[in-house]
Each structure stands twice: as C-alpha cells, then as structure tokens.
Image (spheres, rainbow, N blue to C red):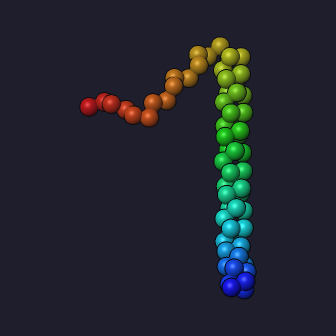
Amino acid sequence: MENYWVAVFWTLLPTVVVSTLFFWILRSILRADRTERRAYARIEAEQRAKRGLPAPEAATTTDATP
C-alpha cells in the first residue's frame, strides 16, 4: 500500500507543477498588461492636460442604438 501512494504522488506531481507554473506566468502577463495600460492612460491624460484638451469620453460596452 505504501508504494501505491508514492506512485500517486509522483504521478500527480508533474501536473501540479506545470499547472502552478502556467498560473504564475499567466498572472504575470495579465498584471504587466494592466500596469502598462495604467501608465499609458496616465501619460495620455498628462498630454491632454498639457494641450488643454478635454478628458476622453468613457467608453461604453453596450451601444443601445436601434
């Protein structure tokens, strides 16, 4: 019975490691994208303020025009 649980452990270990690695890589990509978008929005707002332009309209996800 002892060998059975060792085999189960070694069988599941690669799946858990690869899943964890995938999760951290995807999480890093999404965080970097979010940070880059915030920085770009901040720079764009500064440039608009310098030129005296109004703030951009908030984008709507649902366009209810019949």
Which residue is most to the top? 52
User: Which of 63/52 is in front?
Assistant: 63
Above or below residue 63? Residue 51 is: above
Q: Report the number of discs.
A: 0
Q: Position of residue 51 (x, y in %)?
A: 68, 17
Residue at image location 72% in from the left, 67% down from the top: 17
Displayed quadrant of residue 31: top right
* Residue 11 makes an appearance in the image: no
User: Which of 3/43 is in front?
Assistant: 3
Displayed quadrant of residue 12: bottom right
In the rendered view of the protein, which quadrant contains the C terminus? top left
* Residue 38 makes an appearance in the image: yes
Which residue is most to the left? 66
Q: Position of residue 23 (x, y in %)?
A: 67, 57
Above or below residue 63? Residue 47 is: above
User: Which of 22/39 is in front?
Assistant: 22
Residue at image location 72% in from the left, 62% down from the top: 21
